[in-house]
Image (cartoon, grey):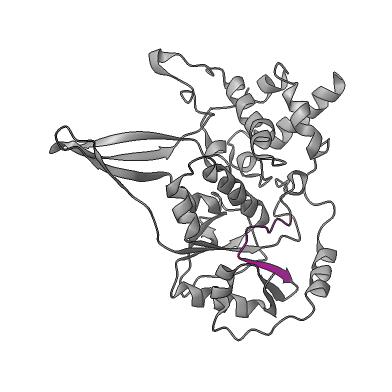
């Protein structure tokens, strides 16, 4: 940690609106009657931290738009095609990011830095500053962030905020966070440990829903449940709409297509769009063969990605952040938390 300040909440709201005069700042704001979205902050935007409800889409999706052009191309005669990458270098601040979504961005950083890396994601990430906010109470009955190790996550935050009564502790964690403080006459906090201890005393215990087994045991338990009846049970009401994929902070599958310029067949653009493993044709390949045509097989693949495949590949405890969005947004109430608990119970009963 570099520096810390302790100021009243109204001053923090004023500071965020001040930043929005010179930066694009996204903050959770009401959308419709009950939903919230990360939207650009304006002069009259309400900045409040206490009445938090998870946004429909996680803030990490600002780094991977639903549709984005990757590059333009042009072919001249027999020469190799000329490719011109399209990279978004516009600076942005994601403010009010909760620990579950902060961890989601951390996991996507690991995915997109692997191998050659994804220049489109990484360029946006380089030009993004993260201002996170701690959770001392569960956002609602759907969250299970503590059960998957997301509660209190702060590793990749540039600035970390903690609300305590009518004040907020501002912890600057990186040089990028320091630039956001420049010019602000905030009182320096000399008793950070004491203030954080007061906050920790206010944190709910237990925090949200808990699994029937420790997180460290879950990958092994799930690995042995390939033929469990649990998979069929939890897709009986599934429409295969893919909503669970689209709102997940760690789903990143995509498709690509080329758009030819009808006035010049030697030029065009390649674009990628979100895809989802719960969609019926996701696993369809050339010749029309679909190797996951059964919705239960798609559900199994999705759950194993979150709790087995990706956790082993990246040495992370879980690729589910426990935000609860998939269960919250599912039109028939299918909840990955319930699926995992049923798998644990089935494994324990048959051990």
Query: How far across and down, in percent of the image, does residue 345 sit?
Result: 82, 27
Residue name at image x 41 percent, y 14 percent: 288
Q: Check the image and name the residue furthest to the front.
A: 79
* Towards the viewer: 271 or 248: 271
Q: Could you say where residue 248 lies in the image, as x and y percent from the top left?
A: 58, 42
Q: Quadrant of residue 168?
A: bottom right
**What residue is drawn where x is 81% and y is 72%?**
193
With 105 as the anchor, is 39 left or right in this view? left
Query: Left or right of 321: which side holds 216?
Result: right
Q: Is 161 colored magenta in this rendering?
A: yes
Relative depth, front residue between 190 and 339 = 190
Residue 142 visible in the shown view: yes
Which stretch did the figure color magenta?
A: 152-163
Give the percent coordinates (x, y) of residue 327.
64, 39
Regarding residue 237, the answer to whether it shows in the image is no
Nearer-the-camera pick, 321 or 165: 321
**Looking at the image, residue 277 lies above or below residue 264:** above
Q: Residue at 87% x, 20% y: name it.
A: 351
């Amino acid at each position: 940690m570099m520096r810390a300040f302790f100021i009243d909440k109204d001053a923090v709201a004023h500071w965020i609106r001040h930043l929005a005069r010179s930066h694009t700042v996204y903050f959770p704001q009401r959308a419709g009657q009950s939903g919230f979205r990360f939207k650009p902050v304006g002069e009259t935007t309400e900045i409040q931290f206490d009445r938090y409800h998870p946004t429909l889409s996680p803030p990490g999706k600002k780094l991977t738009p639903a549709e984005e052009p990757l590059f333009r191309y042009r072919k001249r005669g027999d020469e190799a095609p000329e490719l011109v990458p399209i990279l978004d270098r516009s600076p942005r601040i994601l403010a009010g990011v909760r620990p579950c979504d902060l961890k989601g961005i951390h996991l996507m950083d690991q995915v997109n830095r692997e191998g050659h890396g994804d220049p489109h994601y990484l360029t946006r990430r380089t030009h993004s500053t993260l201002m996170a906010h701690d959770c001392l109470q569960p956002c609602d009955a759907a969250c299970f962030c503590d059960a998957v190790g997301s509660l209190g996550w702060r590793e990749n935050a540039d600035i970390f905020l903690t609300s305590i009564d009518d004040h907020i502790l501002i912890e600057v964690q990186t040089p990028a966070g320091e630039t956001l403080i420049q010019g602000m006459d905030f009182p320096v906090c000399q008793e950070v440990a004491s203030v954080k201890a007061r906050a920790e005393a206010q944190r709910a215990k237990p925090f949200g829903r808990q699994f029937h087994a420790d997180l460290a045991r879950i990958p092994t338990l799930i690995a042995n449940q390939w033929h469990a009846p649990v998979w069929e049970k939890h897709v009986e009401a599934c429409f295969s709409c893919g909503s669970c994929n689209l709102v997940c902070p760690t789903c990143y599958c995509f498709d690509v297509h080329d758009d030819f310029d009808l006035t010049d067949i030697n030029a065009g653009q390649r674009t990628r769009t979100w895809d989802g493993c719960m969609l019926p044709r996701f696993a369809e390949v050339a010749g029309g063969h679909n190797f996951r045509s059964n919705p239960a097989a798609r559900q199994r693949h999705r759950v194993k990605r979150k709790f087995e495949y990706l956790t082993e590949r990246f040495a992370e405890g879980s690729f589910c952040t426990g935000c609860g969005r998939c269960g919250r947004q599912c039109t028939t109430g299918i909840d990955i938390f319930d699926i995992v608990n049923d798998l644990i119970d089935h494994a324990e009963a048959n051990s």
